[in-house]
Amino acid sequence: MVKYGLDYTRCRWILPLLLGIGVIFGIIALAGRGWLESQTLPYVQQASLWESCRRPGPGGEWTCESLMGYAWGRAAAATYLVGFILLVICFALAIIAFAIDTLRFNFIRGIGGLLFVAAVFSIMGLVIYPVKFSTEIDMTGINMFSWAYGFGWTTAIMEICLGFFFCCLPNYEDQILGNVKPTYFYSSP
């Protein structure tokens, strides 16, 4: 990407594309019912960010209880949701920043800072949830934090990594815009 510069059409949209993938992973984490699941038979426990469901046996009906009745449930959902909203704002700002012909590198650094704030909120929600869930909700058998919870962590890790990339990108402004003469290490005789 640095070799061709951000004017190279295909490379210009890599960062907004990665932010878009992070948004998709965040939607999966918010909507997924697999934050916590039973690991072994009988499969009687299943939970999302919003509710906890259990059934008496393998053939029984699922009964669900909202986690919004708990202060920690509201806190976990709110902090993760704030992190997700900030990620969506960063995605929109990145599309605007890279759609303009002349890149505004200070604008890009601001997106990186906002991504770090989004990561802090997401991680707060991802830490509150398992700590309080495992102490306040009665669990039966062996349970595991599952795929949707993993998508939440993947979103948080992407926010941190993309935040570093957005913050460091303006340091290479001249190389990206092609204002620096290339240096050759091999000289011909």
Image (tube, rainbow, N blue to C red):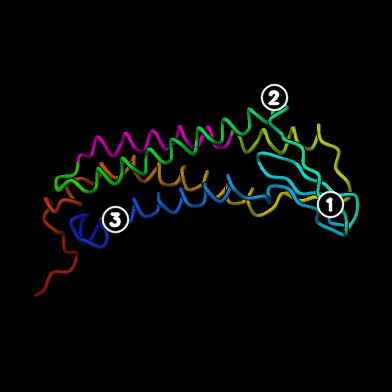
Residue wearing tag 1:
61
Mark found first going from the N terminus, 2 or 3: 3
Q: Which residues are magenta?
A: 104-123
Q: Position of residue 182 (x, y in %)?
A: 14, 59
| In the image: residue 72, left or right of residue 183 | right
Mark 1: few/some/many CA within 10 Å (<14, 14-19, 20+): few
Q: Secondary structure at mark 3?
A: loop
Judging by the rendered image, the residue that carries numbered circle 3 is 13
Determine if the magenta segment contains residue 118. yes
Residue 7 lies in quadrant: bottom left
Task: Using the image as rendered, state which of residue 179 and residue 131 is in the foreground.
Answer: 131
Q: Measuring 65% from the left and 54% from the top, which residue is drawn there?
A: 147
Q: Return the disc, 1 or 3, that comes first in the chain's sequence.
A: 3
Three-letter residue code for mark 2 = Ala
Under tag 1, what secondary structure? loop
Q: Secondary structure at mark 2?
A: helix
> Do the residues bearing badges 1 and 3 touch, measured as CB atoms within 8 Å?
no
Task: Tell me, for residue 71, which label it has, or none.
Answer: 2
Query: Taking 4 as reference, is 83 above or below it?
Result: above
Density class for disc 2 (Cα within 10 Å; few <14, some 14-19, many ≥20) is few
